[in-house]
Amino acid sequence: MIFDFVNRSLRSPSVLVSVEELIANSQGSRMPDVRSEVLTATIARRVVEACGLSALAIEDADGRMTLSLDYGKCTGCGECIEAGEGAFLLAESVSCGVSRQSLIRRWDVEGRAEILTCEEELSASAREIRSIVGRALNIRQVDGGSCNGCEAEIGALSNPYYDLERFGIHFVASPKHADMLLVTGPITSNMAEAVKRTYEATPAPKLVVAVGACGCSGGIFAASSAVSGSVDAVIPVDAYIPGCPPTPAMLLTGILRTLRRR
Amino acid sequence: MTTNPATRGAEATAESALRLLEGGNARLVTLFGSVDPDGAKRVHYIVDVNREYRSISVPVTGALPSATRISPAAAWHERELHEQYGIEIDGHPDLRPLFSHAADYRFLQVQGVGVCELPVGPVHAGIIEPGHFRFSVMGDSVLHLEPRLFYTHKGTEKLFEGAGIMNGQALAESVSGDNCFAHAVAYCQSVENAFGISVPPRGRAIRLLGLELERMMAHIGDVGALCGDVGCAVPAAYNSRIKESLLQASARFFGTRYWRGIAIPGGVRRDISTEDARAFGKVVAHAAADFAEMAQLILDTPSVQNRFEETGVLSNKIARDLGAVGPVARSSGVRIDVRRDHPYGHYRNITIEIPHFPQGDVLARARMRIEETRISARLIQEMLNGLAAGIHRTPVPREGSAEGFSAVESPRGELLYWIRIGNGRIIRCHIKSPSFQNWPCLPFAVDGNISADFPLINKSFNLSYSGCDR
């Protein structure tokens, strides 16, 4: 009987998505990007008003108006794109597997240009893990209280389109076998202790990646009294993957980026 | 529908709600509290009597007579009411807290020589949500299972309070992330019912597309996961591939893999061109045909039959007593489905086939998901072939005060949102998720089985932790 399955599968062409198509591809995540050349002060004020999660903010840097967009808070609700009069559009690529600070982009509104910051260094633990495990990486996924949206997408990483194992990465059942914890949030009050203990049970060197808007910032649940907040409110975090939920391509990009394999 | 004014006022008492439950053909849908502007507490009962929702709202003055004595389906609802509103419930057998996790929580203990306690969770071994299971086992056999949930409790109902009515759907989408469209639609319909707004036909049609597609994706994924749990790796992988093809089609034609950001009070935010509708239909038809073929192979496999059949039986009596809903109920011979019993949106215009199986085992729940996938795919094709023309969204007043509720049949069953709106803002939102109702059924299906079958039985229920915990 099992041969019928194999036969059935072999008749279908491969659906494996190439690495080039996956890396730095955020399509389908609904995250916004800014067309700085058409950005105005009026639009900036309007989108800040429209954003229900304060992912967009106006800052005053030396008397110059700066618009900031924090992807760690953004759920891709699309309000800014509706209110942005063409200055906001769907992002093709969003940084994943970077520091919390690097999830925030800034634009000089009057100068109509993005304020670019320089690339950050690979952390000591990431360097150490890369030197020990080479191309093999064991991940323990931990749900700290999420809505299950991130889990659905993390689960998709193992399907024949993304096939995470081709990169030598696989999910393990115990934190004791893990090099990396992939933690979703928000960390609820009821899960905080379990998340801390899971972290402690993971042998060093270890990496922690916070996943999703809730994992990065508490997201839509940040104000709730029943949650402790973002993952880094409970355990140390090395890198962040934004999105609500992040697409499988963003998750894969973020995991590889954390180790600077991409 | 809006709350029936005839059931409000002086004559509505908790006793009258309980009498309603005592009569035959009555099923408790939900029970929850609210606080009036003057600070007075109120309890709301929603009961399904002969396929008609009756809403009874009762002011609370002292202790409340427990509905659990009449309908065990009320047990967890009354525990929640007691814990969150401090209302005394007279005659409730078990008022241990659900949400607050104190260290001195007492599990039911099974005593006797050779009985072992097996604690599992909250952190589970796979990519799944957290919860704790306390098994009392004798050798391989489970004598008793007690789940302790609410690890993912996020105070979601409280977060709705104060939000503008046009923002609530974003929160609804984050209640149970893999059924986010059903949650968003249930929320939007409750606002529309409160204000008496009618969604344009095209908006209703696109909602049906999303709801049935979400059901297909959930069921195809579940059947694959069931195969994975019995070591049948090839169909597990193949089903994940079929599911992914639908997710990618959603991203391509609707800009979102899980239909987030589409539902909005008054309709939907995305339309689809005739050309795209045709292409989308092709992907769905292909996925459905592929899955049907794969499903037949799965059901014909002796090792699968051996593991699925007579495993994790939920009896019809328990399912009825505990008010089970959705595919779980229908697989135990309880013929309920919101789409047929309380039609909403475009379901009012169509007759829908409701499969049911009497056996109540894992096999019945697997076959239920296979049948429902076939029916959903057909509904999507019919919808796409005769997609109503016109606008897909109608304006909703940003001001005004009203109260209303609405249910949809999510992939997991009856999902109900009840909201009270004051000056365009949400004052109270209650979510009755199908998993909250179905979780208490699971131990009855597990007891007497071997502990190694637990993951399989649990998967066949596929309950949402976050949806239940909120």
Image: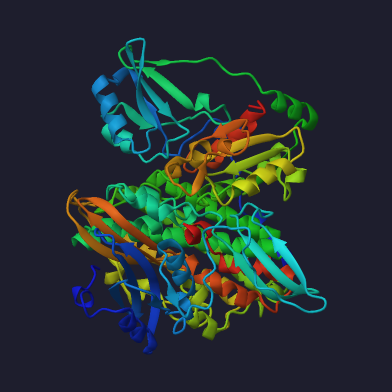
Q: x, y (%) of residue A66?
A: 35, 18
Residue lying at the far top of the rendered structure = A62
Q: Is residue A84 visible?
A: no
Along the horizontal axis of the image, is B216 left or right of A1? left
Along the horizontal axis of the image, is B38 left or right of B384? left
* Total marks in image: 0
Q: x, y (%) of residue B43?
A: 33, 70
Q: Nearer the viewer, residue B357 or A238?
A: A238
Q: In this view, does B195 lie above or below B446?
A: above
Q: Is residue B263 above or below residue B48?
A: above
Quarter of the rendering containing residue B461: bottom right
Residue lying at the far bottom of the rendered structure = B24
Q: x, y (%) of residue B177?
A: 48, 52
Q: Nearer the viewer, residue B402 or A149?
A: B402
Q: Which of B350 and B280 is in front in this view?
A: B350
At horizontal 53% and vertical 28% (from top left) the residue drawn is: A100
In the picture, the quarter occupied by the N terminus of chain B is bottom left
Q: Is residue A48 visible?
A: yes
At horizontal 24% and vertical 60% (from top left) the residue drawn is: B38
Q: x, y (%) of residue A251?
A: 57, 38
Along the horizontal axis of the image, is B227 left or right of A92? right
Q: Which of B359 and B78 is in front in this view?
A: B78
